[in-house]
Amino acid sequence: MERIILAATLCVAALLFGCTTAGKEGQTCFQSQNCDPGLHCEICLSAGLRPRCTRTQPISPTSKVKGLPFNRYSWLTTHNAYARIGVKSGTGSIILAPTNQEDSITSQLQQPAINVLQEIKIFLEANPSEIITIILEDHVTSTNGLTKVFDAAGLRKFWFPSSRMPGHGKDWPTVDNMVNKNQRLVVFTSNQTKEASEGIAYQWKYTVENQCKSCYAPPIL
């Protein structure tokens, strides 16, 4: 009888210990609280339906391999990524995504474009080895409207000219070359006519997109 009680006690202790031990990267989980700090409990459809502790940590590819043409690197980008600091979910659920915005969508839309571009100028001046790529959903109809706002923001000195962008899948200049020439601002527009009229590269002449695979957080149990 004592052996049975002892065995049961050990089993309960093991279960409790397993529940309180933080999960490592790749281990299964029920919610983010089950994972080590810096990890999130998520389901990736490409890896099956069991939620696992996952780390999202972007790394600059140039820190791993140097000297390659700009187009030989894979650059992490965002599209409609929005998680405002200090705001609770309207549905009452826990927001698991890292926060990345300080202003509401309305305030951002009301902000003059030149203010945003001037922030980019400040960043480029403070980080002389960094390259920024901007992809514009372009609805500007005024003559040379984009050119004027980029010039007013003082960004022309960083401009990577579309004349240096190779077509037909050929290699771009190396990152080092772009940095040395201080041509560290790459701008694409969704308006095909702007390349001829303003020298702003048409996005789909030079870029491609991969198929997105959905990842989502499991419900809170």
Image (cartoon, rainbow, N blue to C red):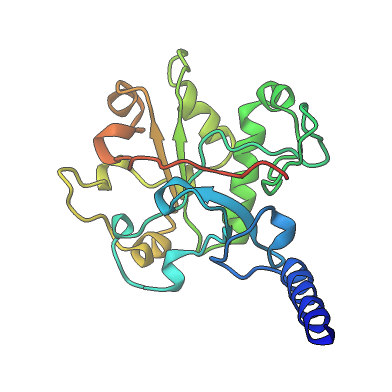
Residue 42, percent across and down?
Answer: 58, 51
> What count of labels does the image hold?
0
Q: Please, is residue 41 above or below residue 77 in the view?
A: below
Where, by quadrant of the figure, is residue 9 drawn?
Answer: bottom right
In depth, the one of 75 and 5 nearer the eye is 5
Image quarter where the N terminus lies is bottom right
In depth, the one of 203 and 87 nearer the eye is 87
Residue at the farthest front position: 1
Residue 76, percent across and down?
Answer: 46, 52
Q: Is residue 179 left or right of residue 117?
A: left
Q: Is residue 66 left or right of residue 30?
A: left
At 40% across and 49% down in the image, what residue appears? 46
In depth, the one of 195 and 83 nearer the eye is 83
At 18% across and 48% down in the image, what residue appears? 169
Q: Please, is residue 82 above or below residue 67 in the view?
A: above
Residue at the farthest left position: 168
Residue 13, percent across and down?
Answer: 80, 76
Residue at the farthest bottom position: 3
Q: Please, is residue 179 above or below residue 158 in the view?
A: below
Q: Please, is residue 171 above or below residue 25 in the view?
A: above
Residue 196, percent across and down?
Answer: 27, 26
At 38% across and 26% down in the image, what residue appears? 190
Image quarter where the C terminus lies is top right
